[in-house]
Amino acid sequence: MRPAHTERTRGRLRSLNLVMFLPLLAAVGALLVATDAQTWWHVIVMGLGVVAGLVAFLWWAARDIFRVALPCLVVAAAVWALGSLVMDGNSAYYGLSLVGSLAIPQLRRHRGWAAVGLTVYVAAVGAARLLVTQDDVAGVLIAYVIIPTGVTATLIGFMFPNQRFYGIVAELEEAREREAELAVARERIRFASDLHDIQGHTLHVVKLKIALAQKLVHTDAERVEQELREVHALVSDTITQTKQLAYAQRRLNLSAELENAKNLFEAAGIRVRVDREADVDAHAGELLGQVLRETTTNILRHAQAQQVRITLSESGITIVNDGAQEVPLPELRGLATLRERVADNGGELTVEQKDGRFLTAAAFPHGRSEVWKGDR
């Protein structure tokens, strides 16, 4: 199953192809038919070739061209044969060259042989025009052999690097998806490391104190009682710290969180800009660090961000990212919990989604953060 980001990127590329090239291809086909067709049935026959090419293009843009490649190729090849041998239509190869150039680069094997075969067919049918008329051999060779063969070969040759380009785009998008997942995994590992630091130290100390109490249980009951009181207090404190860590309430260093967020975004291929306008009060810095950590995780998990801007002022912090989906604001439980904690400390946590951007801002009294300007 392909990553969602990759599918969305391919969808955008398909829309771009349809908007940019479909009208142009249709206009060129209509112009060729209007120029070459001499009777109404010429219009119908040559029009079928153009339609075959446009249908192939639509399915190529949808990345499923082989669903229609064979019938489109048969129709376009027949139109070229009729145009060359019956209708005196030297542009009837248009549909065939379009279908071939779209389908052949998509083949998994024998693409070179298929390209040569199609080019030879175009040239052979054009040369067969000499069996119908020999009045102007040079003109027939130019109009029915050289030009159609050259155009067909050029289109096929052009589509090979074009196909590689789309492959590279897909690979880059998949790599970006993997980097984002890796960044989230690193954050989870960091959480596990914090948990280990809290509980590992406590358990080690508890082990030593219990061992000491076992030795003194028969000789110094007062010292044993003291050690057990310390063990009880230590375990209680560890439980509190674990809860704080689980609910993103543990004391954090804002500077360390800024550096960590920057590293996570860069690892996920996201451009990040940090504007540190002033230092923040130590107590407020703990809450702002928690807001930054939760927002960083949300961006990596839920957004398709290409750039993030973090602004730290004396009154608070603002994080703005692009790539927000045009859907109702999702439920972000971590930020909802933090909103209550910020409010309890006299501040305000704001979350907004607007024009493809997502804003998270935490502000405290004595100057409120109201930044919604994106990158300057």
Image: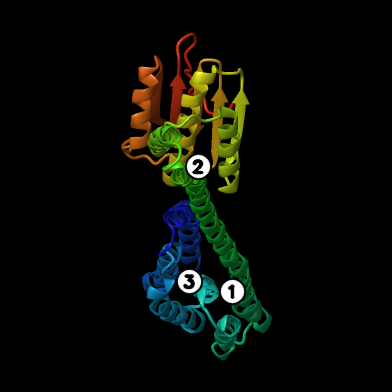
Give the mark nearer the N terminus: 2 vs 3: 3
Q: Position of residue 201 (x, y in %)?
A: 51, 42
Give the mark nearer the N terminus: 1 vs 3: 3
Does the CB distance between marks 2 and 3 fall below 8 Å?
no
In the rendered view, tell whether residue 370 sits above or below residue 84: above
Q: Quadrant of residue 1?
A: bottom left
Find disc 3 in the rendering and name its residue: 95
Does the CB distance between marks 1 and 3 fall below 8 Å?
no
Q: Position of residue 132 (x, y in %)?
A: 54, 88
Say left or right for 331 vs 21: left
Quadrant into which the C terminus falls: top right
- Residue in the picture at 37% in, 71% down: 44
Q: Report, in whole angstroms, how far the alpha carbon at label 2 lies from the one at label 3.
A: 80 Å
Q: How is the image coloured?
A: rainbow
Give the farthest residue toward the top: 366
Is residue 374 in view?
yes
Q: Amino acid at mark 3?
A: Gly
Label 2 secondary element? helix
Find disc 2 in the rendering and name its residue: 205
Say left or right for 376 vs 296: right
Give the crowd class for mark 3: few <14, some 14-19, many >=20 residues within 10 Å: many
Near-viewer residue (217 or 292): 217
Give the crowd class for mark 1: few <14, some 14-19, many >=20 residues within 10 Å: many
Q: Report, in whole angstroms, how far the alpha carbon at label 1 lies from the one at label 3.
A: 10 Å
Label 3 secondary element? helix
Label 1 secondary element? helix
Give the farthest residue toward the right: 138
Q: Nearer the viewer, mark 2 or mark 1?
A: 2
Give the farthest residue toward the bottom: 131
Q: Quadrant of residue 75?
A: bottom left
Near-viewer residue (136 or 17): 17
Residue 152's disc number: 1
